[in-house]
Amino acid sequence: MDGKTRQKKRVRQDFLDAARELVLEEGTQNLTARKIGERAGYSYATIYNYFDSLDHLLFEVTLVWLQELAGRVRERLQGPLDTREDLGDLLWTYVRFYLEHPNIFGFFFYDRRGVPDGDLARQLEEVDFGRLLQEGLSPYMIRGQIPGEDGKTIGELITYHLHGMLLMTLADGAAADNREMREQIDRLVGFLLAKETENKVMDDWEREE
């Protein structure tokens, strides 16, 4: 890699680092190209020599954080997924990331941008939590604890529930009660798996009849 290429790569990374720092420190409400340029130490107009648009830069920031989150979830997926507690741990891994970084949650879910290009869209899809959650639910579906035909719907309901919890917790800026949120997750998992146990008991009873 020649000196010019290294310089371009470094400047590009400076802009990405500056955007991440600003989101973590201040959120997205007043995030502008000018502020990112000032934080990076360059003219804001220079951003457009490295990114097609401000949205393009922010999508790349999104990708880095989603890759970090997906890495945590994938690490938990390597562990046991046998009990209610195991599934609760998986969901807690996802929620805890946003509790640790509330401004990232706002960046992902409050800040509306355009549509990413083909390559970025593909990379974002690879780290989509919904896909990872289906991997986590798969052992429970195989064992019949969750009906296989309902797996996609249950995954969506879980995701909506987690996002609702986070929205209500983080919207007012108050400190999260981690214990209460974990208990909510455990109640959700208990409800989902208990319903399947109830259905299995009824099926066994009907067969005996």
Image (cartoon, rainbow, N blue to C red):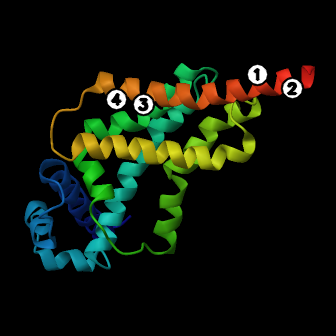
Query: Which of the marked residues, 2 or 4, is nearer the chain's N terminus?
Result: 4
Say which amino acid is labelled 2: Glu
Say which amino acid is labelled 3: Trp
For marks 2 and 1, give the one nearer the viewer: 2
Q: CA distance from mark 3 to mark 2?
A: 37 Å
Q: Position of residue 30 (x, y in %)?
A: 11, 64
Q: CA distance from mark 2 to mark 1?
A: 9 Å
- State the mark number for residue 92: 3
- Circles 3 and 1, Cβ within 8 Å, touching? The answer is no
For marks 3 and 4, give the one nearer the viewer: 4
Residue receiving disc 1 = 201
Q: Is residue 75 above or below residue 19?
A: above
* Dot 2: element: helix
* Dot 4: element: helix
Residue receiving disc 2 = 206
- Circles 2 and 1, Cβ within 8 Å, touching? The answer is no
- State the mark number for residue 181: 4
Q: Is residue 129 above or below residue 99?
A: below
